[in-house]
Amino acid sequence: MQTSLERQALKEISNQEKSNVKASTTVKVKELKRVSSDYSDVGYPYTEERGRLTAREQINEQFKEILFPYSSNEKSILEEAIDLTFHEIESDEEETSPEDILEDTEQESSYIDETEVESYIEEKLKIDYEADTTVSVEYAKDIFCHMKHLENRLMPDYGYLASRPFHVLEMRTVVISWIIGIHYEMNLLPETLFLATNIFDRFFSLKNVAISKMKQIAMAALLLASKYEEIHPPSNKEACSLLGEGTVGDLCKEETYILIVLQYELGWPGPMPYMRLLSISDGWDADMRLAVKYFLEICMLDPRFLSQKASQTVATCAYTAYCILHNGNWSGTLHKLTGYHCANVAPFMHLLLECLQNPAENHRCVYAKYSTRISRYISQRIHEWIRMNIQVSSPGPYM
């Protein structure tokens, strides 16, 4: 039996141990908090003025042998990668003129742009076509024929141009230019832009649209096209804020009305499948792809090209790009895939060259879009070639 004095002594010893544990725990927590705040970017580090290293320096000293297992005179792989990255960033910041690109068009750029991504996709497609049986190459001819059928059936009625006054057609060009800017701002796919223009023109050919409503109809067409083509389309709220007028409900009503008028037919293939097929077959370089895209958007702005099918427009742009960039040396693949000889599209090539002569008047927004470094200044280079090599007489007003 323990006496009362023994029990009291044991109780005091227990309390003392508890207080010691609590005190040591408190000290440890404070130390961890100090290290945590010391490691942060906005903390109050314990500098060498107080006779100790910062927590970041302590960690670096601990793991120095792991992170940098080389001598002080040698650089680790990590350090070399960092130096290379900074070198590339500094080289990107140097100014580059169109003349520099003209002198060495074969030099690879140090940034990733759309042309490099498309080149990778095309190489991937080549491998997939040979190795993947799910691509169903045996049905390629049927798919191609179906695309031809759709591009014929879902063309806008070109006859409506004759019943529209000239200022309405001019307003169409202004609205399409605005849509190109919105499309570029939203970073959407090229297919979305061409499908939006097709939806707008088909609706415009079936219904009389007031000039005050053309901008809203164009935005609704862009939303429909993005929901058809994009994985993550922009929201109606975002589109309404860019439009600057109306409400989200108004845009939804306009989308519904357009779908009813067009009978929910949005399967127009557009020019991009033909362009990519030609690019894979003929092995186009980055300049060729950018030039054809530039020409396609110019054709989209001018109502005189509405009478062309999508495949015919691609043939026109491809032949023109070959004439400018490769002195007219095109392969027989171009005729086989599009079905058009150069003579078949010569009048539209003449019309396209006319549009290229005065970019400030005909297609200022597209010219600015393709005069950036990421587009390899292709519009400036083509305009310089047009100015120095060719003079085109105007074929006249809208047909």
Image: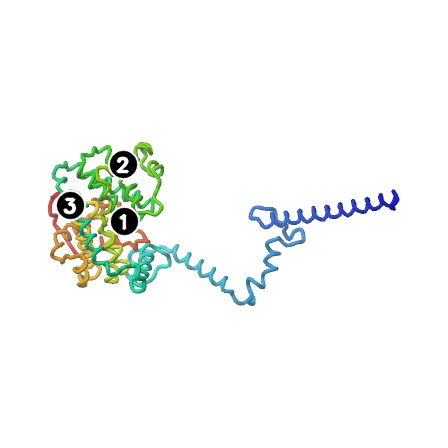
Query: Which quadrant of the figure has residue 203?
Result: top left
Closest to the observer, 356 or 199: 199
Q: Residue at the spot x=60%, y=49% of the render? A: 36
Mark 1 vs mark 2, CA separation in Å: 21 Å
Name the residue located 14 percent from the left edge and 57 percent from the top edge. 340
**Front position among marks 1 and 3:** 1
In contact (CB < 8 Å): disc 1 and disc 2: no
The percent position of residue 109, horizontal first and vertical second, equals 35, 59
Q: Between tags 2 and 3, which lies in front?
A: 2
Amino acid identity at mark 1: Glu
For badge 3, the amino acid type reads Arg
Relative to 59, say whether 397 is above or below. Answer: above
The amino acid beneath tag 2 is Thr
What residue does disc 3 label? 304
Say if residue 45 shows up in the picture. Answer: yes
Q: Which residue is mark 2?
A: 256
* Picture quarter with the C terminus: top left
Q: Which mark is residue 191?
A: 1
Give the residue displayed 17% in from the left and 63% down from the top.
332
Q: What whole-number distance in Å separates the C-alpha atoms at marks 1 and 3?
A: 21 Å
Q: Secondary structure at mark 1?
A: helix
